[in-house]
Amino acid sequence: MEKKKKGEDKNMGKVAIYPGSFDPITYGHIDIVERSLEIFDKVIIAIAENADKRSLFSVQERLQMVKTIFKDTPNVLADNFKGLLVDYVAKTNAKVIIRGLRATSDFEYEFHMASMNRSLNTHLDTLFMMTSKDYFFVSSRTIKEVARLGGGVEGLVPDLVVRRLKEKFKLPVKKKKQISWDD
Ligand code: ADP
């Protein structure tokens, strides 16, 4: 009898890994997850622990936000991983990595990463999804910049993330300076 390989168990369904920093998760990410669920039975959001990248939220904070946001969606799981993505994927029964593309500028980096991952594991494919028109300008980085400066990011990230950003960037409440024309 032929030995079953990881990912060949039909009962487990089609699983995809959606890796990234998710620092923090945005509606751009959530849109990609929701669309992936039309293709896959299960999506694992895999938060990369990257020591080189300075993150605003700790891995545990990011994980907690993702888990809370998807608490009513049992086919979306959240996890974190260290090291090579291909090694992490090999421990699951997924054969596909999902990535989102916002602009042509994303393409070159993503193309290199997907090619490298395929050369490290030939059974692995990367599926790219084009951003939706509502979120093409949304990135975790710009969300953090705007929130830090006190701008509104409602509608671009879930309310929970809006609250967490406000907590992180808590600025001292300044008393309104009275402008007097007599000064
Ligand atoms: P990175 O791994 O570069 O830190 P992120 O964690 O921000 O990336 O995002 C993970 C994945 O989600 C990447 O493939 C990124 O291109 C994609 N992504 C991020 N924001 C959006 C968006 N607004 N629309 C579509 N895809 C997105």
Image (tube, helix red, strand yellow):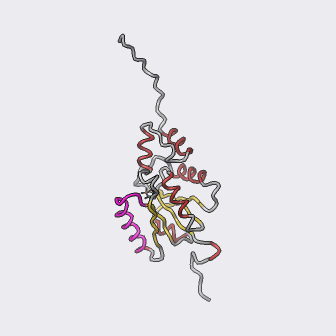
Q: Which quadrant is the N terminus positioned in?
A: bottom right
Question: Where is 92 relative to 164, above or below?
Answer: below
Residue 9 lies, in percent from the top left, at 62, 77
> With respect to residue 30, does 178 lie above or below?
above
Residue sitting at the far front: 133
Identity of the residue furthest to the bottom in this view: 1
Which residue is at 54% across, 49% downward? 61
**Residue stretch in magenta:** 101-118
Name the outermost residue toward the top.
Answer: 182
The residue drawn where x is 54% and y is 47% is: 158
Residue beneath the point at 45% across and 55% down = 133
Residue 131 is situated, as x and y percent measured from the top left of the image, at 45, 58
> Where 153 sits versus 60, above or below?
above
Quadrant of residue 149 within the rendered picture: top left
Residue at horizontal 57 percent and vertical 65 percent from the top: 38
Quadrant assignment for ligand 1: bottom left
